[in-house]
Image (spheres, rainbow, N blue to C red):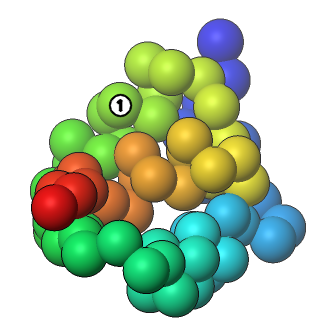
Amino acid sequence: MRELSELTDVEEPAWPLLAKALDASGVSMEVLPVDPALGRACLLQLQVTARSWLGGMVLNCGGVVLD
C-alpha cells in the first residue's frame, strides 16, 4: 500500500487541468469545496495518485453539482 505522500506529491497534478476543463464547460455546474482531511483519506483508500483525474477530483473537490 502506498503512503499518502506518494499519492499527493506528484509531477503534473491533474487538478489544474481538470479545474480549467470544468470552468470551460458549457454545462451549468458548481464545484463544491473539499474537506482536506476527507480528500486525503479518500485518496489513500483509492490508492490513485493526484496525477490522475480521479485522484485530482477526490483530493481537491468535494463534489460537482450539475444542472
Please say if 2 is above or below 16: above
Instruction: Please provide percent x and percent y for residue 64.
Output: 25, 56
Quarter the C terminus occupies: bottom left
Counting labels gives 1
Local SS, label 1 = helix
Tell me the quarter of the picture where residue 30 sits. Answer: bottom left
Please say if 2 is above or below 57: above
Instruction: Please provide percent x and percent y for residue 13.
Output: 70, 66
- Residue 41 lies left or right of residue 44; in this view the side is left
Q: Residue at x 64, y 31 (%)?
A: 48
Residue furthest right in the image: 11
Instruction: Please provide percent x and percent y for residue 5.
Output: 61, 47
Quarter the N terminus occupies: top right
**Residue receiving disc 1:** 42
Q: Nearer the viewer, residue 65 or 7?
A: 65
Q: Residue at x 31, y 60 (%)?
A: 61
Disc 1 marks which amino acid? Cys
Please say if 48 is above or below 26: above
- Residue 15 lies left or right of residue 45; in this view the side is right
- Residue 7 lies left or right of residue 55; in this view the side is right
Q: Nearer the viewer, residue 26 or 15?
A: 26
